[in-house]
Amino acid sequence: MAIDGYVAICKPLHYQTIMMLIGFLVLSWAVGFIHTTSQMVFTVGLPFCGPNVVDSIFCNLPLVTKLACTDTYNLELLVIADSGLLSLVCFILLALFYIIMFVTLGQHSSSASSKAVSTLSAHITVVILSFGPAILIYIFPFNSYSVDKFLSVFYTIITAFLNPIIYTLRNQEMKGAIKRLCSRNIISCLDT
């Protein structure tokens, strides 16, 4: 209520937008909490025996449930359907919002819109490379650990490096430095 009162009094013209954004924030936190808690409740009571080692860098829940001493087929289907569906819905919503943004930017022709399109294309690249492997892990639960390890390394390392690289290459000073470096190397190559 304090946030509602503050926004209503101090930012009355932006009240609806700010409260909608706060609603989206609360919704995303609630969905994440419910999703994680539901999966934990189903797996915490499983009896585990034998070697409790997950041979993967990315310790996802389907691999953990395979360590249980009981039949977990139904639980694995539930986890895969739940996680895969959540990832797919989030990806579809993100794609829909990016399409809406591109259509809106297409209606305005200016130099600022080209910069916005550049930013959106960088965002879309990171989103696709982040959600793609995550969706693949849950849509096609692999029995071979090598594919799972490849996807987990891709998901946890490559996409983490990709975001800073994209934004570094979009920086004007960095572009100038790369051009100077390339021009020096081309000149030194031509001199030899």
Image (tube, helix red, strand yellow):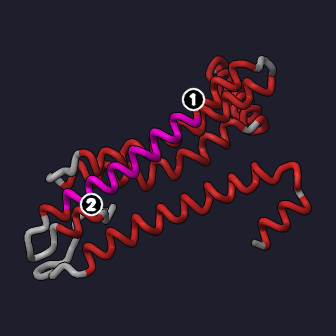
Relative vertical location of residue 154 with respect to residue 98 in this rendering, above or below: below
- Marks 1 and 2, how far apart at CA: 30 Å
Of the pair 89 and 179, the residue shown nearer to us: 89
Q: What residue type is labelled 2?
A: Val
Of residues 136 and 33, the one drawn nearer to the viewer in this rendering: 33
The mark nearer the N terminus, 1 or 2, is: 2
Q: Residue 99 carries which label?
A: 1
Left or right: where 107 falls relative to 37 = right
Point 79% across, 73% down: residue:
2
Q: Which amino acid does label 1 sit on?
A: Ile
Position of residue 190 in the picture relative to residue 146 (left or right): right
- At 60% from the left edge and 43% from the top edge, which residue is drawn? 165
Name the mark on residue 181.
none
Magenta-colored stretch includes residue 61: no
Mark 2 — residue?
79
Viewer-closest of 7 and 60: 7
Picture coordinates of residue 84 (x, y %)? 32, 50
Q: Which element carries disc 1, helix, strand or loop? A: helix
Residue 3 placement: quadrant: bottom right
Main SS category, magenta section: helix
In the displayed structure, does residue 143 sit left or right of residue 128?
left
Residue 174 higher or lower than 49, as above or below: above
Q: What stretch is highlighted in magenta?
A: 76-97
The answer to the question of whether label 1 and label 2 lie on touching residues, with beta carbons closer than 8 A, is no
* Element type where label 2 sits in the image: helix
Q: Looking at the image, which is closer to me, 14 or 136?
A: 14
